[in-house]
Amino acid sequence: MNRKKLQKLTDHLTKNCKHFNKSEVTCLIKLFYNLVGDVAERPVAVVGLDRNAFRNILHVTFGMTDDMIMDRVFRTFDKDNDGCINVSEWVNGLTVFLRGSLDEKMKYCFEVFDLNGDGFISKEEMFHMLKNSLLKQPSEEDPDEGIKDLVEITLKKMDYDHDGKLSFADYEKAVREETLLLEAFGPCLPDPKSQMEFESQVFKDPTDFSDM
């Protein structure tokens, strides 16, 4: 990509980007095209990161291990649902992922946890996510029973309108009272250490265009 094209793309993405400045957006664009270059050997019509490439980034860079959650993070980034994360989805997604306000992170996490996209986190969805994210305990008891109990405890704490599922209003109220509940159903945001490492590695001096 030549300097003029990069400049134009950077200006366009910076305009809609709350939490990154122009040089940071430039760095993220460069990283995106480097990453896409790694998967570009395959004949793809869309320039972007497919599910596997993106999940690899979540796993290697941000230490995520839960397949179900990584899949949901991919879908949350992939706003146009074309199965590929393009450069603007990449920058806009990382804005919230790395530096979002509490409001933005709540919307993002709720979207990740709402597995079927119906606007609620149901008991079944809670069960699946908690079963996935808890370590398998070698015990005599039926582990599913323990998870069902956990779902009931979670509902007691978060289901303010007592309808047996979590709406965004329920979730938001619970998280505002206890921020730890933001990732109640699985880690879908980077921990501070991997966030700092990612930023310090990626946001280097953007004047060096030699690798573009």
Image (tube, rainbow, N blue to C red):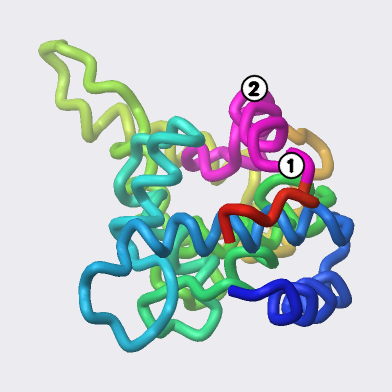
- Count of residue discs: 2
What residue do we see at 24% from left, 68% from top?
A: 41
Q: Which residue is mark 1?
A: 203
| Badge 1 or badge 2: first in the primary sequence | 2
Which amino acid does the dot numbered 2 rest on? Answer: Lys
The spot of residue 29 in percent (x, y) is: 64, 63
Distance (Cα) linking label 1 and label 2? 15 Å
For the record, the magenta segment spans 180-205
Q: Return the residue nearer the eye: 205 or 147.
A: 205
**Which label number is shown at residue 193?**
2
Q: Is residue 97 magenta?
A: no
Circles 1, 2 touching at the beta carbon (< 8 Å): no
On the image, the x and y values in percent for residue 156 come to 59, 41
Residue 45 visible in the displayed image: yes
> Circle 1: is it few (<14), some (14-19), or many (20+) Cα within 10 Å?
some
Residue 162 pos. (x, y %): 61, 58
Against 41, is 132 above or below?
above
Task: Indicate left or right for 167 with 138 as reference.
Answer: right
Q: Amino acid at mark 1?
A: Phe
Task: Check the image and name the residue furthest to the front.
Answer: 210
SS state under label 1: loop
